[in-house]
Image (tube, helix red, strand yellow):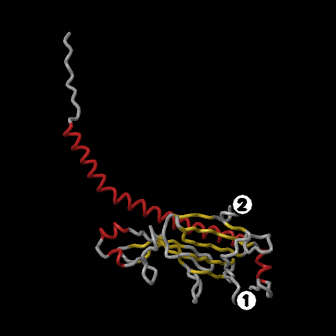
Amino acid sequence: MLVLEKNIKGFNIIELIVVLSIIGILSVAAFPNFSAWQKERRVRDAAVQIKETLTSINAQVKRGLYAYVQVYFSQTDVGLEVISKGMKIDSFTSLINNESGDDNWYDADFEKCNITNATLKPDAAGFWDDWGGISNNNEVRRVLLDVGSPITEGAVCFSKSGKHYYAEEDLDDPLGPVEVILVCASGNCGVDGDGFPAEDLNANGKEDYTEKRNFAYRVLWTRFGDISLQAWNPKLAKFIDK
């Protein structure tokens, strides 16, 4: 019986070069979009974590675990550090009833939203009872986020009723605590004087914006614990709720 010889063919070198060239061209074309997607996701996830940190510590105030809390922000060499801290009812009651000495709550120079005292209660020199990343307590947290922000260092503090509401450093303003933090892909976010992404990010049109792609998000809050998340829309030139 005769067996038909199979005609088996493979890629020749020219065909292989053509295929690899096409793959290379497609990869180069797709990489900017993939890179932009990664940056956008990183910034969005960071903003969500900030919102969750604020929401979580506010929930502990409402349920009565803490009477007074703080969310602290600090720009480090590796990203934005966010720490929540809590003060229990007994500690806070003792503090606000103190009207003498160095810990006089009603002294104009007293740091009501303390960011410098790292000593914890029950040490007599302590300010906070629990500190994210230090205390063995899941109700407070510390997260390190690979994003930029105009804030170098700042903190906001609030109580259950909203009666006690203070801020420190970059979040402190003569008109009252700043109620927003902006995060972006890198650096100081390139914001203008009003805290919006600067116009020069769009100076050369869509391609330039895609290249720089700051993907700005911001988290807002109020003294009563209302937390919201917004994303910057470059086409509308404004932030929109997410």
Give 130 or 118, whichever is nearer the viewer: 118
The residue that label 1 is drawn on is 107
Residue 193 found in image quarter: bottom left
The residue that label 2 is drawn on is 136
Residue plotted at (71% across, 62% down): 137
Give 34 or 152, whichever is nearer the viewer: 152
Q: Residues within 10 Å of mark 2 (few under 14, many from 20)?
A: few
Rounded to the nearest angstrom, the CA distance separating label 1 from label 2 is 32 Å
Residue 139 found in image quarter: bottom right
Residue 222 found in image quarter: bottom right
The N terminus, quarter of image: top left
- Coordinates of residue 154 in the picture (x, y in percent): 58, 77
On residue 123, the disc is: none
Residue plotted at (38% across, 68% down): 213
- Coordinates of residue 81 in the picture (x, y in percent): 57, 67
Residue plotted at (64% across, 64% down): 141
